Amino acid sequence: MANESGYPAPVPNADSKPYWEAATREELVLKRCSSCGKHHFPPRHLCPACWSDKLEWTKSAGTGVVYTFTIMQRAPMPVFAQRVPYVVALVDLEEGPRMMANIVGDDALQTTVGERVHVCFEERAGGAKLPQFRRGTR
Amino acid sequence: MTIQLRNKTAIVGVGESDIGKVPHMTGLGLNAQAARRALDDAGLQVSDIDGLLTAYSFTEPYFMLGTVLCEYLGLKPGFCSAMIAGGATPAVMLGHAAAAIATGMATTVLVCTGENRATGLSRDDAVSALAAAVGHPYFELPYGPSIPGCYAMIARRYMHEYGISREQLAQVAVTTRRHASLHPNSHMKKPITIADVIDSKPIAAPLNILDCCLISDAAGAFIVTSAERARDCRRKPAYVLGVGERHTHEHILCAESLVHFGAEDSGKAAYAMAGLGPQDIDVAQLYDCFSIVPVIELEELGFCQPGEGGAFYAQGHADVGGKLPINTHGGMLSHAHAGATGGLLGIVEAVQQLRGGLGERQVEGAEVALVHNEGGVLSSHCTVIIANSPR
């Protein structure tokens, strides 16, 4: 999963290919159930709320709230050592699902629980892009 | 769980391997040493064992670990499996062993697990192997989280909702280390202070190195048999009264809440099977991979109100001699941790507390013990209640 710069790059599979393709266009997309209307993440073959397999990909507003975060001071893999200290957060998207991301930007270390964040994209190997978040609204 | 297990089985033998840095032994060797000690403790013969359950290993390259361990030990049982519910595995294995015995699938089951994680892997390799094993490979690992980082996010949310102080969190590590110093086999015995914890090396804010469990070479084993057979064993049996599980998610991004977990439901199921409640528990061994975890488990298991777990430790209620002594062997923070071994050593300690005679760390009059194991990031939960007599 590592690229030339060493950071893990996205690995699309049958469940997630449209998600990562959208990310390369700098769009955040989520799977939504056509039967019960709920969004879910990570993307699955069926809706974990009602088990319907009638799902559609929808574009997320790309905004959310920080549910919690940590400032990583010891890297889990050698490649992340150059980023320390960095923020790993759980972000509650407006549509409902929660996702993990880094809070990036010059003021990332000032992240607080409950504050609003918006999506941005970080380039990884082979032109792949990883959804990330910045503090504040766009 | 539909099968009523109360009073049907008992733990009759327990054993710990050598603990700490044991470079002259393999992981399988540590398992064998713990198993041999448990067998001798029970006063049973190898030929009495007709079932084996074990967990997993990061340090040895075997796939069918249950079968491999049977092969290593020269066993040919009719009941055998390697189970994976992370840190919850030992308590889950106790439940499965008890159910197998209660239904006649086995009569005497050896449960053991252990790894040479301190000397079989470098610390860097251990940290990244764990992150890779527990973090979501596609939607978490690209962001560089670690296991301590995930638990730090739990601690942060808990602080946000309940306002536990840094000192209260540190007290968990201090109390646990004091208990470890009273146990002859503990990995870390040197007393620590709240200031030591707060000033220790930052890992993932708000957690420091002394908020994190050890990485040890260690194995543990226990032997379960029917209540009838237990009466003929060498040591006083620890009867299995209740077992409960709850599995709610695996990856932290899929946890519905980071202040409320499956421990409440697993605890309720165990209490219901035992016909007991939190007020009946004399000593508890709570999973403590990070200092925040036993604080949350105390609340989920009904020993105090939500938000009061930190004060419980700060007021000394978790000390030997306190209202509910917790992790009297030093837990995973200070006694030992290697893969699934941490939770299993909590079961070993609970049995020993019920037998009595532990000197300074003995909980006076301990008759009923609770053990809670959790795996993943508070993902898989199993609570067990054992007692020194049938109830």
Image (cartoon, coloured by chain):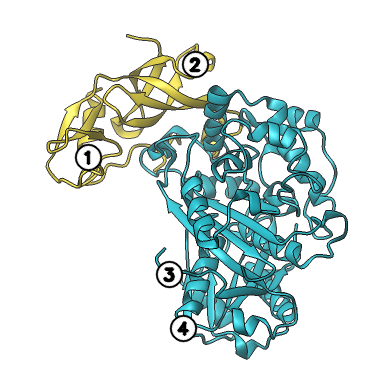
In the displayed structure, B22 sits above or below B211; it is below
Look at the numbered disc 2 and give the secondary structure of its residue.
helix
Quadrant housing residue B27:
bottom right
Q: Which chain is cyan?
A: B
**For the residue marked with disc 3, what is the amino acid?**
Ile
Q: Are marks 3 and 2 on the same chain?
A: no
Camera-near label (4 vs 2) is: 4
**Residue density around tag 2, few if under 14, some if 14–19, many if 20 or more, within 10 Å:** some
Instruction: Characterize the local packing of mark 3: few (<14), some (14-19) or many (20 or more) Cα atoms within 10 angstroms.
Output: few
Against A110, residue A71 (above or below) is: below
Q: CA distance from mark 4 to mark 1?
A: 48 Å
Look at mark 4 in the image and give the residue it sits on: B104
Q: In the image, residue B148 lies at what x, y percent?
A: 58, 38
Chain A, which colour?
yellow
Residue type, mark 4 in image? Gly
Identified at 29% across, 21% down, the residue is A94
Residue closer to the observer: A1 or B274: B274
Residue B274 located left or right of residue A19: right
- Work out whether residue B282 or residue B82 is closer to the camera in this orientation and state it: B282
Q: Name the secondary structure under disc 1.
A: helix
The residue that disc 1 covers is: A17
Q: Which residue is mark 3?
A: B3
| Mark 3 and mark 4: Cα distance apart in space | 13 Å
* Image depth: mark 3 or mark 1 in front: 3
Q: Residue at x 26, y 28 (%)?
A: A23
Chain where mark 3 sits: B
Tell me the distance, in whole angstroms, between the alpha carbons under discs 4 and 2. Answer: 59 Å
User: Looking at the image, is mark 3 or mark 4 earlier in the sequence?
Assistant: 3
Mark 4 and 2 residues: CB-CB less than 8 Å, in contact? no
Question: Which residue matches tag 2?
Answer: A108
